[in-house]
Image (cartoon, rainbow, N blue to C red):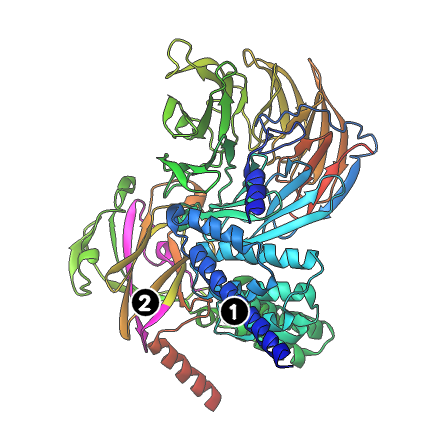
Amino acid sequence: MRILQLCGLIVGAGVWLSAVAEGAETEELLQQIKSVGPQGEGHRAAQRALRELMQADAAALLPILEACDDANPLAMNWLRGAFETLADRTLASGGELPGTELEAFVRDRSHAPRGRRLAYDWLCKVDPSAPDRLIPGMLDDPSEELRRDAVARLIAAAEQAAKGGEGDAATQSWRKALGGAVDEDQVNLIVAGLKEQGEEVDLVQHFGLLTEWKLIGPFDNKDMKGFDVAYPPEKELSFQSTYEGQLGPVQWQPYRSDKPDGLFDIGELVFNHKGSAMYAASAFSSPAEQVVEFRLATPNAWKLWLNGELLFAREEYHRGMFFDQYRVQGKLKPGENVLLFKVLQNEQEQDWAQDYEFKFRVTDLSGRAILSSDARRAAQSTSDSTKSR
Amino acid sequence: MQRLSLLLIVLMTPSVAGAADWRQFRGTSGEGLADAAAPTDWSDGAPIAWSAELPGRGLASPIVVDGQVIVSSSSGPAQQRLHVASFDAATGQQQWDRQFWATGRTACHPTTCVAAPTPASDGARIFAFYSTNDVVCLDLSGNLLWFRGLTHDYPNASNSLGMASSPVVVGDTVIVMVESDADSFAAGLNVETGETRWRLERPRKSNWTSPVVMTDETSGRSTVLLQSADGVCAIDPHSGEQVWNYPDGASTIPSSVIVGEMVFVPSNGVTALRAGRSNPGVPEVVWNEGGLQPGTASLAATDSRLYLVNSGGVLTCANLENGSRLWQLRLQGKFSGSPVIAGGHLFIFNQEGTGFCVQLGDDKGAIVGTHEFGESFLSTPAIADGAVYVRTDGHLWKIAQP
């Protein structure tokens, strides 16, 4: 009997050691894949690791998902390729995906949103009941895609209630949906639905659009030569100073857009100076250091600085303007931050090339509006006063 | 593991071009001309062999490689999900679907979409390219071989209207054109590793044309022709070095077509060029015909005729030798997709959802059949193994005689 027990122990230890070794090997392969970088950096080692990883069994699926947590956007796609090959082969060969573990991974919001969505997509292939179980609780999820699905369900419920003449139920669903919606198409549907029920939505507030800017200009951009010229506002932000502009002395002036969609129309608020550059500045208060996205849209060329640091520059004119067209990450410091936005108009004469405008908002990485602390206090104050009435 | 490595090496070795393949935009040769016949009996409408559902959106043409029909698509509210799917050419059964996340900007004009460029293949690998300038390389089983994000590498390489240039593969290099107002380049990527062999600065002007490949029949040497608003630049595909340059401007939407040693360029109407005979470093203008005005659709050609569709939906046949117009035929609707030719017939599909089968005669053309698909076509068909494959956003169709 003792010999049998001993044999059992040895076999068990062997299995355990083998599993540990496999785990360590998988981890090493994942690290090699995560080392891919721009310009094809690390490709050869990653390719060797990928080929080996794709020969593993379903036990490697969860480690691949976990590896997404700190993978760069390029490596995420390499990991996704490995995951899908393994998952596909597992199912094709009659095997099972680890449904319980996949669901736990989806539910764990500490994991990367894209890794969680990948887990969700494959969970749904083997468990059609998963959406009903998971999605309703994801209205505030950090994953844009999961949250969008939760909003879509509420929109469907609201539409059904409205069709059935249940106005109050429709309104409740629309309101709840609005709480999670960040995508423009969904928000537009909700806004229209609430309007039918007699409610207006403040889109500027909901999206966190910045509509108050100080402007100075125009500066010269004839022949599009002003893009790389550092006019005085790029060298100093002195709101009391006067500078020589394209048409004479210029000073900073405050402007506010009252448009319901938050469009800041320079052409309308100031003038559509052809071949010009304007600077817009705005203060943004943050309660703490935080990484945010500046999401903006403009058909004009532009440069963006945060607290004096150039974040991005783009020289493209009149190729269209789309909601959240550009997403630029930046780190806000605690207290007041200063945004400087240079917007440039060229001299094209076509009807479709006359706009001189932008939309600008600050969001978290999933697109939820982040309001300046001042604006948040003002909004709270308005809300409180509304309630008190 | 050794067996596996051997298998992978075999899988990764480019095969000789299969006669029935259609490996890139406008065919393996890029001239929109199929070797084999195609279904021309449309008397009861197009003979539909099968159709398959596709996700999201897509303007990319199907390609056909070794009995697989490969299609790329983009889905999601911002089209951030990139798809490559394979269908069995015989049955229409989906064999696999691989998805990736866009790393470049997805904004584009609503008419177009992120999956606008047509994938390319060397017979062993698939290179799917998107408006986001992401390049996905898969083997024919759908296994990822490498992934590049060219806008991730060059953050200003994008066009807010969307990009559409399709890649070409020449030997061991896949060539992509990433040309926009803000940052503009062409690149040659190593087909095995995805590493950059060369990167060439290009005119900073939006450009939706695709590169075409010219192969010298005697030496077998290929050059790749890059068309832009500035003209046409011929380069060595392996090094990116310029071979010759034609500086007199060209269209940024319809692409050129090559027949033998000649290239027919949408430039000042249409201009026929070839590498100079006395000095191969200087191109020779053989003829120019200002009256030939292609619209969005790219040119197609046989060995004696040039075909183009203008913005009014009129198909023109011209003599390849001198550009003289031989006949015209009014089609119906707007055309974004390009024509392809097989067995003396031309196939083209319009934005209103109508497919046309046109018999090409010496002195006239005749519409011998149309088919209403009920979905808008913005893509170019593929022809392989006697069948026409065409896609809309939502569906892939195989047209073949029963």
Percent coordinates x, y for residue B98 in the rendering? 60, 52
Percent coordinates x, y for residue A344 in the rendering? 32, 50
Q: Is the residue B257 above or below the residue B76 in the image? A: above
> What's the chain of the residue with tag 1?
A
Percent coordinates x, y for residue B201 in the rendering? 35, 35
Instruction: Decide which of tag 1 and tag 2 comes sooner along the chain.
Output: 1
State whether residue A346 appears in this view. yes
Percent coordinates x, y for residue B23 in the rendering? 60, 33
The quarter of the rendered structure image containing the N terminus of chain A is bottom right
The reply to whether label 1 and label 2 mark residues of one chain is yes
User: Helix, strand or loop at disc 1?
Assistant: helix
User: Helix, strand or loop at disc 2?
Assistant: strand
Q: CA distance from mark 1 to mark 2?
A: 45 Å
- Magenta span contains residue B240: no
Say which residue label 1 marks.
A17
Q: How many numbered marks are there? A: 2
Left or right: where B190 falls relative to A135 = left
- Which residue occupies 34% across, 72% down? A290
Q: Amino acid at mark 1?
A: Leu
Q: Label 2: how many residues lie within 10 Å, few (<14), some (14-19) or many (20+)?
A: few
Left or right: where A380 falls relative to B337 = left
Q: Which mark is residue A331?
A: 2
- Which residue occupies 37% across, 12% down? B279
> What's the chain of the residue with tag 2?
A
- Magenta span contains residue A286: yes
Q: Mark 1 or mark 2: which is in front?
A: 1
Q: Amino acid at mark 2?
A: Lys
Which stretch did the figure color magenta?
A262-291
State whether residue B265 appears in this view. no
Left or right: where A95 falls relative to A291 = right
